[in-house]
């Protein structure tokens, strides 16, 4: 049986009906027509505390944990994002994330809610997205920073190459200064922002706007700051005893507010460990070490990436930043507790031994990796981040071979 379409024009008045070619259509309905209609079935009520989706994430622990995200959590994020980015029907949003990665919620729901277009890229197109962006006139880019780092390493981020972008957003891992600079040059009409947020704080909870002129001075360990929280969120930086630290001191970032999830799925013990109440507000412990300086938060690594080598406390992120400054494109530093040693895995450098020497000129001897492994391409996990577990399996001993 032939099915004839119905044409809906919710933003047009009745005067345009005669201008529409309706051959074969069952009818054309404009704004006035739709305003007088009554739904056959009233839409179901959606409670703020109702479950929107359940994501299982292992983070850096390797142990899966369920994170129940409510409709209220998602709505709070979407409101904050719209207030900041002002998505309109004229926008075209990239869709680079797998739908099991919560960052995809931004692409999908921001586009659907505000009448914009989603431009879903094939994963292979991420290796050279420029023709795709130009052909589809993409205006809002959102990806993990690794994409920018890889394109920079390949020399692909030439100035002015992405003229249609007005927003360039990165989230999911640290955004290196060099990647931000190269992307900004390639998209000169774009505002570049670094977003931060664990799944437990619903997609993203802070943002920092890159300054092409003064941005380098704000970077710490070679990474762009994570900025300030979205409206309605309350940050708290604490020590190991959950006591607030003085402004400018390093501590663990905790966050309360409408984007904070209720807890972990069917895991009361883990919920009690990672969430706490203070002054009538419920905080989530992110496990991320930060410092408030120059009016914004800077990310200093995770508390589980602070290790001891030879009795000294070492921050792996600081070593990775030194490796990048010394000339490699990407760097991951691993701690080998059984051998009380550090090893580095890098890409985009010709002389690994020379790289170690350069790092030794910047850092104390106990922070210099005992071995530097050069690989052609950094392995990525399903979310596009450097896969530390895969690297540890391959380079988990000093005697490991490339």
Image: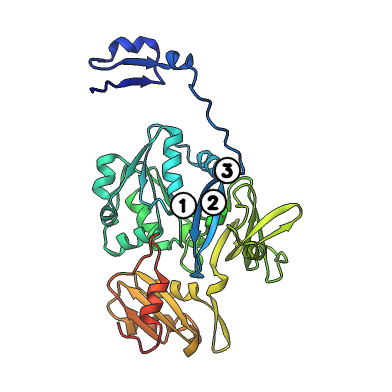
The image shows residue 367, relative to residue 206, as above or below, that is below
Label 3, secondary structure: give it.
helix
Q: Nearer the viewer, residue 328 or 11?
A: 11
Front of the two marks 1 and 3: 1
Q: Could you say where residue 129 lies in the image, as x and y percent from the top left?
A: 27, 51
Please name the residue shown 68% across and 69% down the image.
239
The image shows residue 373, relative to residue 324, as above or below, that is below
Which residue carries the number 3 mark?
Answer: 76
- Number of marks in the rendered image: 3
Q: Nearer the viewer, residue 166 or 398?
A: 398
- Mark 3 and 2 residues: CB-CB less than 8 Å, in contact? yes
User: Does residue 153 appear left or right of residue 268 in this picture?
Assistant: left
Q: CA distance from mark 2 to mark 1?
A: 8 Å
Please name the residue shown 52% across and 29% down the image.
43
Q: Residue furthest right?
A: 279
Which residue carries the number 1 mark?
Answer: 102
The image shows residue 155, relative to residue 328, as above or below, that is above
Which residue carries the number 2 mark?
Answer: 202
Q: Nearer the viewer, residue 61 or 351?
A: 61
Crowd rating for badge 1 (residues with CA inside 10 Å; few <14, some 14–19, many 20+): many
């Amino acid at each position: 049986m032939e099915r004839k379409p119905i044409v809906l024009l919710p933003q047009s008045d009745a005067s345009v009906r005669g201008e529409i070619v309706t051959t074969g259509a069952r009818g054309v309905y404009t704004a006035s027509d739709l305003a007088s209609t009554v739904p056959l079935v009233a839409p179901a009520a959606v409670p703020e505390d109702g479950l929107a989706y359940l994501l299982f994430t292992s983070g850096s622990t390797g142990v899966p944990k369920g994170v129940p995200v409510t409709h209220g959590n998602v709505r709070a994020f979407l409101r904050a994002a719209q207030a900041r980015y002002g998505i309109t029907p004229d926008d075209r949003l990239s869709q680079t994330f797998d739908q099991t990665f919560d960052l995809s919620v931004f692409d999908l729901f921001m586009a659907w809610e505000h009448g914009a277009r989603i431009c879903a890229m094939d994963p292979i197109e991420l290796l050279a997205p420029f023709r795709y962006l130009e052909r589809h006139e993409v205006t809002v880019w959102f990806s993990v920073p690794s994409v920018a780092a890889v394109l920079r390493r390949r020399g692909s981020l030439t100035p002015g190459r992405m003229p249609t972008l007005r927003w360039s957003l990165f989230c999911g891992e640290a955004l290196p200064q060099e990647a931000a600079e190269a992307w900004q040059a390639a998209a000169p009409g774009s505002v570049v922002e670094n977003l931060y947020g664990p799944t437990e704080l619903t997609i993203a909870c802070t943002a920092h706007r890159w300054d092409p002129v003064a941005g380098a001075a704000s970077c710490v360990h070679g990474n762009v700051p994570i900025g300030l929280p979205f409206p309605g969120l309350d940050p708290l930086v604490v020590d190991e005893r959950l006591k607030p630290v003085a402004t400018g001191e390093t501590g663990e970032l905790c966050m309360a507010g409408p984007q904070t999830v209720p807890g972990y799925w069917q895991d009361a013990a883990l919920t009690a460990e990672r969430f706490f109440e203070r002054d009538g507000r419920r905080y989530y412990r992110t496990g991320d070490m930060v410092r408030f300086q120059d009016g914004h938060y800077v990310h200093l690594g995770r508390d589980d990436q602070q290790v001891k080598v030879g009795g000294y406390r070492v921050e792996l992120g600081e070593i990775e930043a030194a490796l990048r400054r010394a000339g490699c494109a990407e760097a991951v530093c691993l701690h080998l507790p059984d051998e009380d040693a550090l090893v580095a895995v890098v890409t985009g450098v010709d002389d690994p031994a020379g790289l170690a020497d350069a790092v030794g000129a910047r850092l104390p001897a106990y922070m210099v990796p005992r071995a530097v492994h050069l690989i052609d391409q950094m392995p990525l996990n399903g979310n596009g981040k450097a896969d530390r577990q895969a690297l540890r399996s391959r380079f988990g001993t000093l005697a490991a071979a490339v």
